[in-house]
Amino acid sequence: MTVLVNNVGDDFVQYLSKFSESGDPFNAKDTFTNFTLDTIASCGFGFEARSLTNTESQFRSMVTKSTDVNHVRQFGQYVIMALFPSLSKLMNVELDLFNREAGNFVLDVLGQCIKERRNSKVRRNVS
């Protein structure tokens, strides 16, 4: 696994060197988020997301979207479920912890990765 993290780390250093040479500012939060997503994609899912170089990456946008929830709406759902359980069942109120579209995307990517690994019989050198 260290090989995979080192590969993403090399991309990270290359990305940051552009800013170092030019002296231009960069968004540290987005940069470290992209580094983290690239590492998770490589180690956990087995593909290169390239979020550092492609900020419009579908993987990045869906993962970001999965945690972008309306907390007021969540609280309202929780109150209805806690105080009025029979009403919540009648109204079919469910507590949405994550964005469903993004969650389904991540599950789909995971399923595709598992299927691809099984079909290709390719082993990743993660030692």
Image: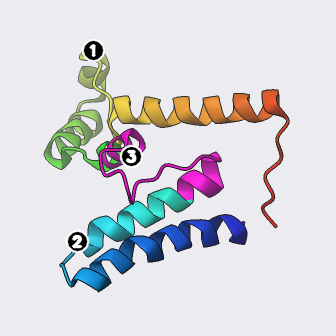
Image quarter for residue 56?
top left
Residue extending furthest toward the left: 72
Residue type at mark 2 is Asn
Question: Magenta residues, as a range?
Answer: 40-64
The residue identified by callout 2 is: 27
| Residue lying at 38% horizontally and 57% vertically, measured from the top left | 53
Please give the label number shown on residue 63.
Answer: 3
Front-most of residues 73 and 5: 5
Image quarter for residue 95?
top left
Q: Quote the CA–CA distance across marks 3 and 1.
A: 32 Å
Examine the structure image and report whether residue 71 is included in the region drawn in magenta.
no
Q: Quadrant of the C terminus?
A: bottom right
Please give the label number shown on residue 90.
Answer: 1
Which of marks 2 and 1 precedes in the sequence? 2
Residue type at mark 1 is Leu
The image position of residue 55, as x and y in percent, is 31, 52
**110, above or below 52, in the image:** above
Q: SS for tag 2?
A: loop
| Residue lying at 43% horizontally and 35% vertically, measured from the top left | 103
Q: Quadrant of the N terminus?
A: bottom right
Which of marks 3 and 2 precedes in the sequence? 2
